[in-house]
Amino acid sequence: MTDYVAAGAADLPPGSSACRTVAGRALIVARAQDGTYHAVANRCSHAALPLDGGRVRGSSIVCPHHGARFDLKSGRVLGPPAHEGIVAYPTRERDGVVEVWLL
């Protein structure tokens, strides 16, 4: 896929997230505290459980199950118990819609 795909309305308040299925992929679309949108795979690398329901802190998301923390922009691990990052997807906002590039 070489283009962006709509992932939902750009109406998330800063510091929140929503689970979305985009082109068959389960994603978390999040809005960081600074207002920027991000999308990551909805699967924690620690125990393969969903990140849905995780808290957005600054520009990171905290797994609701065991507390692993991931950078929303890069997917990099920021806190244990996870040791591997998660997939992060480029996003943009266009005409009130968050779009994700599924790489």
Image (cartoon, rainbow, N blue to C red):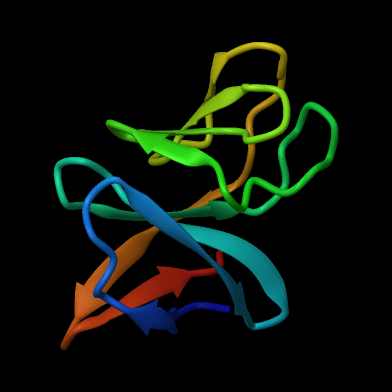
The answer to whether residue 16 is above or below residue 23 is above
- Quadrant assignment for the C terminus: bottom right
The answer to whether residue 81 is above or below residue 5 is above
Question: Residue at point 14% right, 42% down?
Answer: 34
**Which residue is at the far right?**
47
Q: Nearer the viewer, residue 88 or 46?
A: 46
The answer to whether residue 33 is above or below residue 81 is below
Q: Nearer the viewer, residue 13 or 102?
A: 13
Please state if 74 lies on the left or on the right of 23 as rendered. Answer: left
- Quadrant assignment for the N terminus: bottom right
**Which residue is at the far top?**
80
Please state if 42 lies on the left or on the right of 70 as rendered. Answer: right
The answer to whether residue 84 is above or below residue 22 is above
Question: Residue at point 35% right, 63% down?
Answer: 91
Asked where in the image residue 71 lies, by quadrant, the reply is top left
> Looking at the picture, how far across and down is residue 24, in whole percent?
72, 80
> Looking at the picture, how far across and down is residue 47, in whole percent?
85, 31
Asked where in the image residue 54 lies, by quadrant, the reply is top right
Question: Residue at point 59% right, 62% down?
Answer: 27
> Looking at the picture, how far across and down is residue 16, in whole percent?
35, 52
> Looking at the picture, how far across and down is residue 4, in whole percent?
41, 79
Q: Nearer the viewer, residue 42 or 67?
A: 67
